[in-house]
Image (cartoon, rainbow, N blue to C red):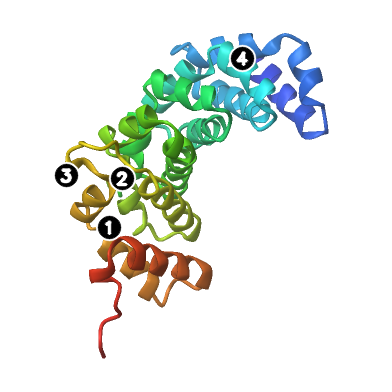
Amino acid sequence: MESLEYAVQALDRICEHGLQRTDFIATGVVPRLAKLLADSSSSVALQQGVLTCLGYVVGGSDDETDVAVDAGLLPGLLVALETKDEELCRLALWNASNVAAGSHSHVCALLNSGLLKPAVCVLMDDQESIICRRHACWTISNLAKVVSGDAKVAQALIEGCCVEALSAALLIPDLKAKERAVIGITRVLEWKPPQGSEADKSPSTILRSASGPQNLRAVRDSRDVHNERIKRQCQSLLTLYFPDCSRRARV
């Protein structure tokens, strides 16, 4: 096991020194790395190194991400998340967010893998580290980018409590998490449910019941948020979808 850890560390260092992703993939090492990740007997240190290397692959083009996904990356991410190790959680969700940022087929593969549930759990758990919650939020907001064009994806996110999770993310004391939450909420609210759908299942209704308007107002009015662009985005969402909550409180 120790020799494998050293080998993976060496691969990581080679990647850091400018190895082209195509050359890295051409070695045939990606399936082996995915197998090590999915092996629950692999040490935490080994899994961390593997995730760093695979993260290099999925940070590239859609074709390069295909190689990692086809090799079994996504089931391996589930194994990593089950360890409850903070650094493994961060790396697993970092990989997941990069996959979610890819093509429509990558979004569907991630949803089919069962990774949405643990990502939502991490995002909604205020006992998790801020950095892990940030990457979970990034994953969900990236998944939401295809919502407007795919009703099945939209339904999966709604049934997976992603709207509630994004609302909770607005209260994370981290600017990046708030930013990604606003992006995700914007994408979800832009989806128009099919005619005849139950009104209580619409994204705006779910967000309202999850204190979304109040949380958007909290970001807009916070003295600790120094990003005016995010505040304006929150105000725009309130004005467009929750006009009854859009006015500032009188002093």
Query: x, y (%) of residue 166?
Result: 35, 48
Q: Is residue 83 visible?
A: no
| Label 3: which secondary element | helix
Image mark for residue 33: 4
Image quarter where the N terminus lies is top right
The answer to which of marks 2 and 1 sits earlier in the sequence is: 2
Compared across the picture, whether 3 is left or right of 117 comes to right
Structural distance between the alpha carbons of marks 4 and 2: 34 Å
Query: x, y (%) of residue 100?
Result: 51, 32
Q: Nearer the viewer, mark 4 or mark 2?
A: 2
- Residue under circle 3? 200
- Seen at 18% across and 44% down, the residue is 199
The answer to which of marks 4 and 2 sits earlier in the sequence is: 4
- Where is residue 23, by image quadrant? top right
Three-letter residue code for mark 1: Gly
Structural distance between the alpha carbons of marks 3 and 2: 13 Å
Image mark for residue 163: 2
Q: Is residue 58 above or below residue 7?
A: below
Three-letter residue code for mark 2: Val
- Residue under circle 1? 212
Structural distance between the alpha carbons of marks 3 and 1: 15 Å
